[in-house]
Amino acid sequence: MIAGCAVQTTHTEQADKVSSDKGLVLALAGITQFSYYPAYMSEEAINKCAAEHVTCIDDPIDQVTWHNALKQAMHPASLEDTDTTSDYEILIASHKRQMPSELADSGIFYRWFSDTSDLMSSVHSEITVQWRGFALDTYAISSAVTKQTDYQKLADSLVSRWLAHAANVGIFTREFLYSALKASNYRDNLHLPKQLGEFYLEDMQLYPDPFLGAIARYRHPIFSEALFDVSVSPIMKQLQHVDFGTFEQALNEEFFRAQNIATERQYTLVVDAPVSQIAASNGTGAYFAVHAVDEFGEPLYAATYVFRQEDKLVKFTSTFPHQVAMPIVEQALAEMRVPGESELMKELRSLF
């Protein structure tokens, strides 16, 4: 199954420090929405009830109470209805564990307590984070309860403690997501030259979707509008089927995007080079080049190239004429190294 690609980690509560700004945990990671679903306790937790001869009652904290706790704690991220699809899903299960009735009724505790019905009672919860159905992390947390327990306050406290764990582990970071899914490690294994011609490497970022990979930007030290971007993503098909059509499809998407932008801004789009095959010293790829003319007659250039390295689609995009861009593309192809095929893509391609 595809879910086998993900490495789900299970944690029990440690000394996690509660964040003073709980919503910041999500905001810093760029998570704007999530979904919540009730779940069942794990088989391990259920078996523990039987092994320890305790009575376990499901859902002492109901769905509405968890929903309220999450909605408040996760702000400014929005809590979507279950009918709305969100990349990140939070599944929560809980049960209440009570002392065996024969022990509570044995009279042992009557010397100190007149009512033993809530002695040694505790709520055990499991909070699981999923990304598009892939389980990433499960956090097990417990809290003692009595008849006087306010379950809304308890849910608020448990969610707060879980968020502290999420912040410490970095569950909502892109690095955690890529690692948990066994996607390519672009941080360590994507090697890019610091300099391409006169352009310097400004930054490299991961996309929020591992199937989109990473993007790096090069800037010119003098001409601020001269940009050269390099994006690397896994090819979403069997590698033996990669051909010019694969490149053509990727470029057509870029070309239509350029057309739409030109139309929205009321620019005239001129095709300098249609989607065509191109040979470089390090392989054969495809490219197209256009420029748009604004109302003042100033040209705005764009050239896009795609090539294959390993199992990755490497795309170069420039904001200057393709005649100037091609030598930079040649240098980039010669000097860059991309990660090899990831465990995630190996398993997915076996299903294509």
Image: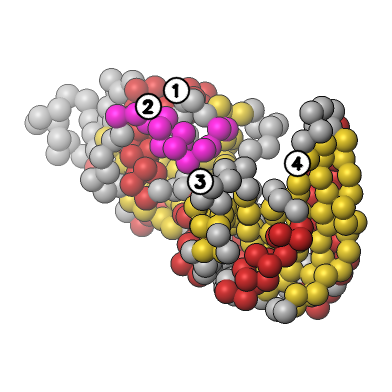
Q: How crowded is mark 1: few (under 14 residues within 10 Å), some or many (20 or more)?
A: some
Residue wearing tag 1 = 72
3D distance between C-alphas at marks 2 and 1:
8 Å
Secondary structure of residue under mark 2 = helix
3D distance between C-alphas at marks 3 and 2:
17 Å
* Direction from residue 321 to residue 260 in the image, left or right: right
Answer whether labels 2 and 4 touch (C-beta < 8 Å). Answer: no
Quarter-of-image position of residue 312 = bottom right
Type of the residue with mark 2: Asp
Q: Which of marks 4 and 1 is nearer the N terminus?
A: 1
Type of the residue with mark 4: Leu
3D distance between C-alphas at marks 4 and 1:
46 Å
Along the viewing direction, whichever of 100 and 142 lies nearer the viewer = 142
Q: Tell me the residue at 28%/35% (across/down).
A: 18
Answer whether labels 4 and 1 touch (C-beta < 8 Å). Answer: no
Type of the residue with mark 1: Gln
Q: Earlier in the sequence, mark 2 or mark 4?
A: 2
Residue wearing tag 2 = 156
Rendered location of residue 212, percent (x, y): 65, 55
Q: Residues within 10 Å of mark 2 (few under 14, many from 20)?
A: many
Q: Tell me the residue at 80%/74% (across/down).
A: 279
Answer whether labels 2 and 1 touch (C-beta < 8 Å). Answer: yes
Secondary structure of residue under mark 3 = strand
Q: Earlier in the sequence, mark 3 or mark 1?
A: 1
Examine the structure image and report whether residue 24 is included in the region drawn in magenta.
Answer: yes
Secondary structure of residue under mark 1 = helix
The magenta region covers 20-33
Residue wearing tag 3 = 129
